[in-house]
Image: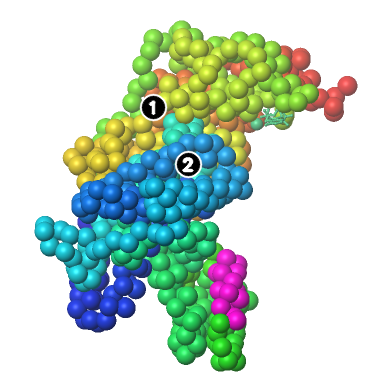
Amino acid sequence: MKNAKQIIAAVVAIAALFLFPEATGNPYYIHLVETIMIYAIVLFGLDIVVGYTGQVSLGHAGLFGIGAYTAGVLIMKLGAPVYVTLPAAIAVTAAFGAILALPALRVTGPYLAMVTLAFGTIIQILINEMTFLTEGPMGITLTKPELFGHKLDETEYYWLVALMLIAALIFVHRVLRSHLGRAFEALRGSPVASDCMGVSVYRYKVYAFVISAGLAGLAGALYAYSEQYISPNTYNFEQTVLFLLAIIMGGRKTRTGALLGATIIVMLPKLLDDLEMFRYVSVILAVIVAISAGVALKRGKSTLQAAMIPVVGSVALAGLSFKLETMTDWRLSVFGLITLFVVYYLQDGIVGFVRGALNLRGHAASDADIASAMTPTGDALSRAGGDAGGNLLEAKGILMQFGGLKALNNVDITVKRGTIHGLIGPNGSGKSTMMNVLTGIYVPTAGTVSFAGTAQAGRTSSEIALSGIARTFQNVQLFGEMSALQNVMVGLHHSFNSNLLDVALHLPRYLRENRDTSVRAMGLLRFVGLAELAGEEARNLPYGKQRLLEIARALALDPQLLLLDEPAAGLTAPDIKELLAIIQKIREHGVTVILIEHHMDVVMSLCDTVSVLDFGQKIAEGLPAEVQANEKVIEAYLGGQAS
Ligand code: ADP
Ligand code: MG
């Protein structure tokens, strides 16, 4: 449960928000705060895409426009009431979001930026041209909505927006803390690991985008009523850039950051119009920055140089504000400077900077999660089924060609159920490539793989993962910004059946699944000896522990087959001993293992069968002792040095 302080702070904040119109009585300020709240709703959504999934969208002004025009057109043509226009705006915009996302999210980086930018532009042109529907450049004039036969006045409408803001905040917060939010965060942390944990990267990118679009649609409709006039020019490129800037300045992955970002993009243009005010604010800013830098320095969280740069920057800005005679010529330059400054020196945004300076913890793991997971249970590993002895995996004639290089050349591998099958060979012999073929990351040039009697051809990585093949990676692929517990919970994603509604309303099904899953995740952490580190961010764990965490996460899939790619690499001797014991225990639970390993003692003590690769070809196979004595194998390992 949340602590009392947080509840009191929330109650005070909400009370202040609702009492604000009565307190100021000034319609200008009421409208200003209303706009900030509406932008904040867009930013909550945009942050899901930018902050959590790590995709760039330049299409959010367009989506915002679609929301506004859905409301505008419904009111103009049908006189629809507000309880129709708001849901309709959400639904229509979410649908457009899907239309944009389905093709766009197949590409990433600059291509995605271009596609979303083009989308925004097309929307603006369409609104302009479809005069029969949108009145084109003339725009649509509307009035504040009616509710229960009563027309809302400025203050009452403000309250409606405030209610929507709180609803959006709770919705986004719940979604991001659920298995859906973990999926979004995971695909940014490591796309390949997400897919291999059964969390389809593409699917959840689209999901995130559609939710984000829905929020932009809601905000757009609220904006239409707020301005009482909509026209195509509002939803332009500048608007889209402002939204992105707000996320960057406020700080990604925080709702406080979104609120702060919204405040900045609404207030800053006004501020830059008013020199007097600008001087005042820039002095305050310089003082705040200097104090935070001082605190950061004192706590040894920052070097002198790193701490001085923001101070010098903000003092210079304050100095400049007193030199300037007029603002008009300088507006854009000052705006640009502030942006550059934030991008270079406050990469986690203002909220991130303050958190860092004051040593506050992020959201990585709430104590609640961990406490609820602490209740002991039985066995963390469920026993893999199936009759022992048969073949679990048959790979036949695998050819994997990269250009002219045959990384795998006609390799056959058969793995018996319940065994530990070693895969060894010199560096570059094709061992990791084999794992990538088995897990669907590479599609082999030729050859077939069948697992538990089913052909794997045409299956995606996440489908293969869900069919019972889990893996770890040679170069660790954890979700760095997530806690150890959350990493394992991503592996348990498959045990959730809850949908968006269950999550948003905290319906019993979701609460039960969430509780059961965190208990199991904790059990798995205990299984690999990481229970004490459950709340630690994965990237902060020592290397050996990271490897163990990867194993726990892989086991969360309830795999029949576990692929371990050099799990002992880089481990200290005691860590290796611990690892050996864990792999033994995994086998005792009936999980079949393919083990790639360079430490011969590990291979010899664990494996039932060993296959040896050299230059992409299988040169030997058999019992560990046989293989070790095989001449071809000895030659391959000694290679160049011998003969
Ligand atoms: P191992 O794991 O046995 O050390 P790998 O399977 O990683 O070896 O690599 C086998 C060969 O395939 C190497 O020569 C490597 O450079 C090449 N290779 C692996 N993946 C790719 C890829 N995606 N593109 C091109 N070459 C690759
Ligand atoms: Mg390798």
Quarter of the image that includes the C terminus: top right
Residue that extends furthest to the front in the rendered view of this protein? 132
Residue at left 42%, top 43%?
A: 97
Closer to the camera in the image, 137 or 639: 137
Label count reads 2
Residue at left 37%, top 35%?
A: 492
Disc 1: CA contacts within 10 A as few (<14), some (14-19) or many (>=20): many
| Residue 382, numbered label | none
**Mark 2: which secondary structure?**
helix
Q: Can you tell me whether the CB of the residue at mark 1 lies under 8 Å from the nearest atom of ligand 2? A: no
**Mark 1: which secondary structure?**
loop
- Taking the image as shown, residue 454 lies to the left or right of residue 448, namely left
- Determine which residue is flagged by label 2: 100
Q: Quadrant of residue 37?
A: bottom left
On the image, the x and y values in percent for residue 429 come to 71, 25
- Determine which residue is flagged by label 1: 558
Closer to the camera in the image, 269 or 458: 269
Q: Quadrant of residue 25?
A: bottom left
On the image, the x and y values in percent for residue 391 come to 49, 9
Measured along the vertical axis of the image, is residue 418 above or below residue 82?
A: above
Residue type, mark 1 in image: Asp
Measured along the vertical axis of the image, is residue 595 above or below residue 141?
A: above
- Taking the image as shown, residue 192 lies to the left or right of residue 17, namely right
